[in-house]
Image (cartoon, coloured by chain):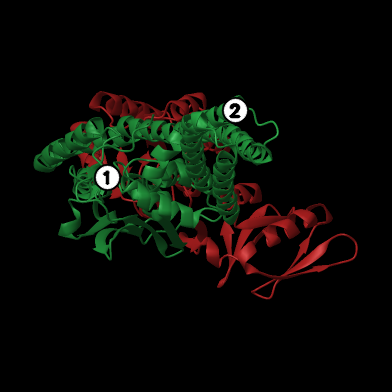
Chain colours: A green, B red
Amino acid sequence: MDDGRAGTKPEDERLGRVLWQTWREVPARTRLTVTVMLTSVVVAIVFQVADGFADGAPERVVSRLVALVAGTGGALLLSIAYVLHGASQKLSSCSPRSLWRSFQPGRLGFEPRVLHRLLLALPTLGMISGVLLSMVLGLLGAGSVEGRPLSLVAAAIYGGMLLLAGRTVTRTTRFLYRHAREQAEAAAAARADATEAQLAALQARMNPHFLFNALNTVASLVRTDPKAAESTVENLAGVLRRTLDRSLHTWRTVGDEVDYLAAYLAVEQERWGRRLRIEWSIAPEIRSLPLPPMTLQPLVENALKHGLGTRLGGGTLRIAGEKENGTLRLTVADDGIGFPPRYRESTGLGTLRRRLATLYGERAELEIRSSSAGATVQLELPDEPAPRLLPEIP
Amino acid sequence: MRTLIVDDEPAARRRLALMLADLDVEVVGEAADGVEALRMVAERRPDLVLLDVAMPEVDGFDVVRHLPKPRPLIVFQTAYDEHALEAFDHEALDYVVKPVTLDRLGRAVERARRRLAEAERRDPSPQALREVAARLPAPAKPRLLVRSGRGHRLLPLAEIARFSARDGLVYAHGVDGRHLADYTLGELEERTAGRFVRVSRSALVNLEHVEGIVSNGDGSATLTLSAGAAVRVSRRRSAEVRQALEG
């Protein structure tokens, strides 16, 4: 999983293709504005050229040529900026979360990534086009437009476009500012979730009930069944080591989580005796798939505490994992009493749901089915190679 | 001194049995849950019960409440929990903390011996038990212990249509008739919150068994239940009951 980024699409597409694709996707109003703009440039050039012929002064040829090149370049840059601005407006109408996700490196395909870079260049494009257009206006002004109606019209068109350039710069800056703020908010939310999960892990690590219960079990077994006592101590050490190891910012594998649960459940099994039966069904090929740490543990803890723990005869805990059509499906089920009526999501489950939403967006599903015959929690995650680190929080 | 061990963890029961043997205490039985504990107390008449507090469905406090008279002495076993221990101390209940040390168990047994010799039997008051129970986490209990003949049985809450109080006794009305329950309506209301609703001073009704509600014109109402019974809803509670039925 470490080489997760390899084999994805090439880093950059050609600018032309990106522009063409963007052009096709921007709102119709933007396309209309750009068309009018480009037509105006053609008109302005025609006027300038016609004016030049009417004037016939050869000493002005150089300045006219410069004005022509600068005017055309400025108008072209302005159209590009306009199209991109339209695209960014469209993007900004997405929810902040999906916007945030689409800007995360490596999350989506080329489009938003390249767009993101171009987006940052928008104010620069606007500025350059503004400078070019002012230059043209200056040149035309120096050439004195008095008594030349054709040049006057060209100057008016360039002046109009200069205003447009100014507007593009302000709007884009405002948009970028808003985007930065949303990104910061999303990052803060992600950070809060991570902190909460870390806290939960810390509590699980230090969970006095689990520790005291385990120690009580070991104390009981030392006399009656020294071998079982030994293996329980080993498993307890395994749980503690793995909990301490677990940085919540590092991806783990399904196999790692399964091994952790195996040690955890072995300790519980000693305590529960025949009241707890455990059925494992983990497809071997999913062991190497990436999984955020502490994903299944809260589900298992829930099942033991609420589903089976309150039943005299205990019950069966089933932990299953399989891969199907690019989806990793993990299931924790019990045949206990089900979630209580008017059930409110426990902190552990709520935190897990939010963490998954931050990591996978809408592509992760957490489904709870519960009746008086038991509860099933099913987790569906996209089966994709993950980056080495969980998304870096800026 | 005849002693009964009650603990849902097999290894813990074995350990206690060995420790009690070291202390020259006779063990008359080991029960793995509350129901078995009540049965063994009735059959074997122990002098002392080492009673685990946290057990599924029928916990230590439920067991104490249903103990037949004359009651044996009780020493609770509890896991570490600061608040609960404070309450145990405050209500002067005898307890040992798990995992119990031989020394601590020895002292608890010694005290029990003294009390038996002096016939100083002091049952924990229901109030004291409630105080302590309130400090402990209360996991859902889907079944309720009711009297059945000379013994007890566990009745699923889903099968109980209603509870009624009459002359200081509380009855659970199940599919096969009514059973005496050793709880007050207030306690049952708390224990079944979300599933049952209090409809009057003397009745608590299972929401899933309600088939209809008819207004009586004077602000009160009448509920019809699936078993065919009709229960009066007091004026004071009728708005609350309607809300619960809609929720």
- Front in this rendered view, residue B237 or B132: B237
Q: CA distance from mark 2 to mark 1?
A: 48 Å
Residue B140 as seen in the image, left or right of residue B183: left
- Going by the picture, which residue comes out furthest to the bottom? B228
| Percent x, y of residue A89 | 55, 45
Against B153, is A309 above or below?
Answer: above
Query: Which of marks 1 and 2 precedes in the sequence?
Result: 1
Mark 2 vs mark 1: give the one in front. Answer: 2
Against A353, is B176 above or below?
Answer: below
Residue type of the residue flagged with mark 1:
Glu
| Percent x, y of residue B65 | 51, 46
Residue type of the residue flagged with mark 2:
Gly
In percent of the image, x 67 and y 56: which residue is there? B197
- Residues marked 2 and 1, same chain: yes
In percent of the image, x 44 and y 50: which residue is there? B58
| Percent x, y of residue A109 | 34, 51
Mark 2 lies on residue:
A143
Q: Residues within 10 Å of mark 1 (few under 14, many from 20)?
A: few
Q: Chain of mark 1?
A: A
Q: Is disc 2 placed on a helix, strand or loop? A: loop
Mark 2 in CB contact with mark 1 (< 8 angstroms): no
| Percent x, y of residue A375 | 41, 59
In percent of the image, x 15 and y 58: which residue is there? A284
Q: Is disc 1 placed on a helix, strand or loop? A: loop
Mark 1 lies on residue:
A11
